[in-house]
Amino acid sequence: MVTRAVPSVALRRPSGLPEFALGCTATLALVLLYAPWIAKPHIRYDDFSFLTKSRTWGETWVNLWQPMNEHVMPLSRIAAAILMQIVPGQGAIPRAAEVQGVTAVVLGMWLLYGFVRRELGHPFYAVIAMTLFGVTTTYYECVTWYSASFFTLALDMTLVGLLAAQSWRRSKRWYALAACGVASALAPAFHGTALLGGAWCALYLLWPQRDNPPTWSRPMPRAAMAATLRDVAAPLLGTVVFVATSLSKKADQIIHAEHYQGKTIFAAFDPIEGVQNTLRTLADNQVLGAFGIAHKSAAFPWSVVLVVVGILAVLGGIWWRVAPHGRLLALGVALILASDLLVYGARAEWSYVRSVHNWTRYHLFPHLGLVLFVVGGLPHFEGRWFTLAPEGRLSRSQAVALAGLVAALLACHWPRSQGSHFYVPEQIAVLQRVERVDAKCREAGIDGVTARQALGFVQFPLGYSQENAWEFLRGSPSPRPISVDDARALLGAIR
C-alpha cells in the first residue's frame, strides 16, 4: 500500500502578510498624523539656503561642501538638488519638502523593522519597534521642517550601518563590514548628529550576548584581538574619513562657525552644560514626548528633574537586569546619552529654557534609543504575558494588540500634531508668482541673474530678513542677450 505524505503545517514557510499589513497600518498612521502638514505645507528659514543654493546641478556642485552652521552636508545638498529638479514648479516646493520628511521616517521605520526582526528573531518585536519609532510627534520638527528632515536621513543611514554590522556578525562576509564602514561615512554627510554613527556600530559589534561572557573579562587570544580591532575599525574609520574630508575642504568655516560668535567649535563645547541639559531633556521631553505630552511654556525645575531622572534610572536598572537582550539595551542607552551630550554640549551657548528646550529635532536619535531599550527587554515576558509561534507567525491576539498599539499612539499624538501645525498662504502665493515669472523667463530667454536684477527684492515669507523670494527663480536655460530694463518691462507686471 502506498502512503501519501501529508504536508506538515510546521514545515510550511510562514507568511509575512500579517506583519507586513500591520507595518503598513503603522505607516498609514504616520501619514495621517502629519496629513495637515502635507495638505497645507510650508518651508522656513534654513530651507531657503538649502534650496536656493541647489537650484541647478552646477550650483549644487559649487556649494556641495559649504557648511550649514558647523555641519558639512554634501548629501543633503544633493537631496535638495534632486527636489528642485523634480518639482514641476516653485509652487510645489513646500509640499515636496513636507513629503520628504514623512518619507524619511517611513524609510527609517522599515529599516528598524528589518534590524529588530533579525536581532530578536520574531516580527512581533519588529512591528512594535517600528510603530513606537514612527507613530509619534516626539521629533515632529524632523518630519515637518525640511532642513530637519536631514536628521532623519542621517538616522536612516545609521540604521543601514547597523544592518550591515548585523549582517557581518551573522555571515562574516567582508562586504557587510565594508558596507558598515561606508554607511558610517555617509550618515554624517546628511547631518552632523550622525557623527557618532560609527561609534554606535562599533558598540553593537563589540557588545556580547547575555549567554556569552564579555571578551574583555578574560584574556583574549591575539587572533581574536585582531579580529575585534578589525570589526571596530571599519565603522570608526568611516566616520574619520568623512571628518577628515570635511576639514580638508572647509576647516576654517567649521571650526569658526559664525553662530559661535568668535569662539571656536571646541571652545563653545561645554561638557558640564551638556550633562545638565541631558538630564533636563530626559525629564522634560524624551520620555513624556513618547506619550505625546509636551509643555512648551517652561522646563521643569531642577527639583522635579532630579526626581524624574532618579525614577527613570531605577526603572531602567530593573529593566536592564531582567532583559535577556543586553546588546539592544546598550545600543539604546548609547543613542540616548551620547546623542544628547553631543548636541547639548555643542549648543551650550543657547539658553535651554528659552530655546533649546523646545527643539524637538534633537530628540530623534534619543527616541530611537528609547525604542531599542524598551524592545530589547520585551523577550523577558515571552511565556509570561504572551507566547510566540516558533515559526515566526503572529497570532490573532498579537495582531489585534499591535493594531491597538498603532491606534493608541495615533490618538496620543494627534493633538500635538494638530496643535503644532501652522500655515502661511502668503508663501504659496509668492512661490506661485515666482513660478509664473520663471515660465515667462523661459519663454523670453531671460537668464536668472538678469531676471533677479530686474525684479528687485521680495521678502520671502518665513525666511530670514534678507532672503529674497526671487532667489527661487532659475531663468532660461538658453538665454538671449537682454538688458535689465527690458527684462523689468517684461517681468515686472506679472502677478
Image (tube, rainbow, N blue to C red):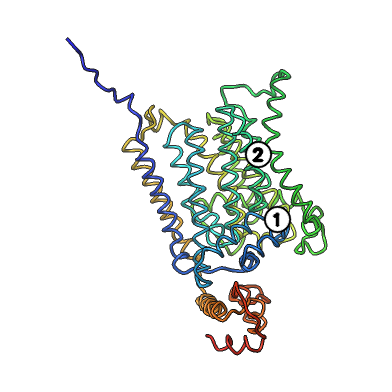
Image coordinates for residue 189, horizontal then vertical, percent: 66, 51
Image coordinates for residue 89, horizontal then vertical, percent: 51, 71
Q: Residue at x 56, y 68 (%)?
A: 43
Which residue is nearer to you in this view: 442 or 2? 442
Q: Residue at x 58, y 85 (%)?
A: 491
Q: Element type at marker 2?
A: helix
Question: From the viewer's perspective, is residue 65 above or below residue 369?
Answer: below
Q: Element type at marker 1?
A: loop
Which residue position is annotated with label 2? 181
Judge left or right: residue 449 versus residue 265.
left
Which residue position is annotated with label 1? 72
Instruction: Please tell me how crowded label 2 is: few (under 14), some (14-19), or many (20+) other residues with Cα within 10 Å.
Output: many
Q: Is residue 351 visible?
A: no
Which residue is nearer to you in this view: 314 or 471? 471
Instruction: Report the disc number at residue 472.
Output: none
Q: Are marks 2 and 1 in contact (CB under 8 Å)?
A: no
Image coordinates for residue 414, horizontal then vertical, percent: 44, 59
The quarter holding residue 360 reads bottom right
Amino acid found under the numbered disc labelled 1: Val
